[in-house]
Amino acid sequence: MLASPGTAVESHCPYCALQCGMSLTPRAAVPDASAQGAVAPGGAGAPGAVAVLGMPEVQPRDFPTNRGGLCQKGWTSAAVLGAADRITVPLVRQSLLRGADQPTDSADQLGESAGWSDQPTDSADRLGESAGWSDQPTDSADQLGESAGWSDQPTDSADDSRRVSPLVPVSWDVALDLVAGRLARIQAEHGPQAVAVFGGGGLTNEKAYVLGKFARTVLRTPNIDYNGRFCMASAAAGMNRSFGVDRGLPFPLSDLGGAQAVLLLGSNIAETMPPAVQHLAGARAAGGLVVVDPRRSATARLAEDPASGGQAGGAGTAAAQGVHLAPVPGTDLAVLLGLLHVVLAEGLADREYLAERTTGFDDVARSVAGWWPERVETVSGVPADDLRRVARLLAAAAPVHGGAGAYVLTGRGVEQSTQGTATVTAAINLALALGLPGRVGSGYGAITGQGNGQGGREHGQKADQLPGYRKIDDPAAREHVAAVWGVDPDSLPGPGLPAVQLLRSLGAVDPDGATTPGRARALLVHGSNLVVSAPNAGSVIERLRSLDLLVVCDFVPSETALLADVVLPVTQWAEEEGTMTSLEGRVIRRRAAVRAPGEARSELWILAELARRLGADEKLAFPTDPAVVFDELARASAGGLADYSGLSHARLDADEAAGGPGLFWPVPAAAADVSDPQVPRVTCG
């Protein structure tokens, strides 16, 4: 039930993985669409609608990650709800409405049911202008077409001709019937794998879970992945290889505050996550903040001596905030190997920890033997003396040497490279050599970026994954999840293609012009703007244009939506209930404060409707209540690495109402009592 105007709703910022706590206070409805705010139900696309819901007022609240602070994105987060080009009704290429999938005499009925006709009305004009399309191409439409990779001039491809046709508003029944009909036909002709699904790290846990379930039980396609492959894949691979578990920060962010030293590589959190900077205050005060960045970024400046005129401070001076190492771009791995070389060569390693809690140490020691500081300097440009100073600074902060604690943290800057996994592994090896992981007040962590970048990679969006961070090729995992879903384990597909390979496989014809069987000919996109976020954008546009069907769920006419055959309007963060998982593995509640505009719907409803139209067995349930979906997710995750089986919306609400710090996975069903203690740290060894 939505809050009444003036009543605050406690929720979280939608943007980064800090998931800063905020309160949303809905304002009273205002009389016309000239006021800021989300279009009210019956808005754009429904003739005569004028009332809008006032944009909710955002206020920060005390929460462990942001401690009452917000960055500019957080303060302005409500603005997206009232975006001028918000899509509020389903859109379909006009040429498809008179195609083989629709009776020839139904076009007029379609137009009437959707509130538009071949003769534009004022309402249709407003919607077209706000969505960036028109029944009559204009200069603006031409520009949009050029930016999206298509033009008004027909090419040899029938596909291109189809997408020159304008996007026009239709009813939900028309849009979903068309999508289901096309998907069924494509799979009947080319097999289940001919339909692919692409998700995103901004979707709630419930949506990510249902997306994976839908792909594997209704479509029965192995081809599902998500945009987290573009950011967290290297960190996840490194952590899984070293620790057997991937929880970005295996400790609460607030633990950083007590550290004597923090080594930060590839992350400019002063600009990307400003509220997190306060957690570095202790390390800065101790002169122990070490920032590795080729640029003099805002975060790098935090490590500078304020009295040095902008130069990196020395570890031994009272005024120093820390050290800024500025390697040649792409040489972070060499820097880490050099730091580990110094730790081992100078006898600074925690030998007892290594003997008791690690394997493979001798191999690692041999691999770094050739990376002495002077050699690293020739490769990276970082002075050998600075490398030695940083290695000693980190060692002095390590518990084995009586220090208050040290952390090694990595971000996308060092992970998004051809040697990203190797760089993450080197960072973890350095932390292990110093005896940091698994000790309170010390450790290694990867700074997750997207709002639900952690939860989004745990419950089935990944090509090789089932809920609970299970492997899809594990027979026991398949049996467990299949039992929750009520399907035969043998009916579940095996691993699919990861994101980059999946995008390359789109279209009946490969990039070399050859027709290859088994390629994906239809794509459903949820929570991702592939044209902007995927590597090699030109190739991605070409592959998307080559599809027989492209369906995009979005709330504005993004670059990817402008290429779509069907665009389905979806709810936004303050219009929906659900859960998110922060960069620390803290599972938190997202709450609805305002009603979604026009006919926007949740992906939970959209997928349930598509499942019904595609003939899903009645025993294969697709509930649309997020709390019910979460309960199913919890059962499916039971026994997995990311075990949520002891959680529910009710328990999360009760914890928050009692002033608790939140609940960190794993939370097995055995710990389902609200009064049970919760351990927020993942230990090793």
Image (cartoon, grey):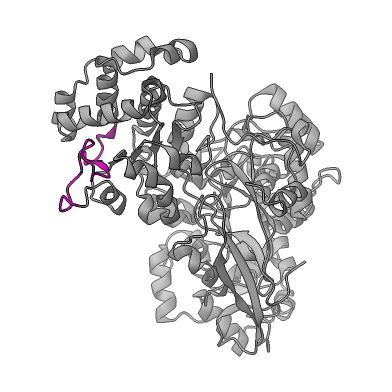
Position of residue 416 measured from the top left corner of the image (x, y, whole percent): 37, 40
The residue at the point 25 percent across, 16 percent down is: 346
Q: Position of residue 305 (x, y in %)?
A: 21, 48
Residue found at the very far front of the displayed protein: 318
Q: Position of residue 100 (x, y in %)?
A: 67, 63
Choose between 245 and 10: the one closer to the eye: 10
**Going by the picture, which residue comes out furthest to the right?**
618
Task: Let me know if residue 312 is in the magenta part.
Answer: yes
Residue 584 drawn at (x, y percent): 54, 41
Q: Nearer the viewer, residue 30 or 96?
A: 30
In the depicted structure, whether residue 562 falls above or below residue 492: below
Give the side of residue 432 with respect to residue 439, left or right. left
Q: Nearer the viewer, residue 375 or 116?
A: 375
* Quadrant that contains the N terminus: bottom right
Residue displayed at 35% across by 49% down:
268
Camera sees residue 377: yes
Residue 598 part of the magenta-drawn span: no
Q: Is residue 286 left or right of residue 513?
A: left
* Range of magenta residues: 307-332
Against 676, residue 41 (above or below) is below
Q: Main secondary structure of the magenta part?
A: loop
Rendered residue at 77%/55% (across/down): 624
Rendered view: 234 above or below 370: below
**Residue 568 visible in this rendered orientation of the protein:** no
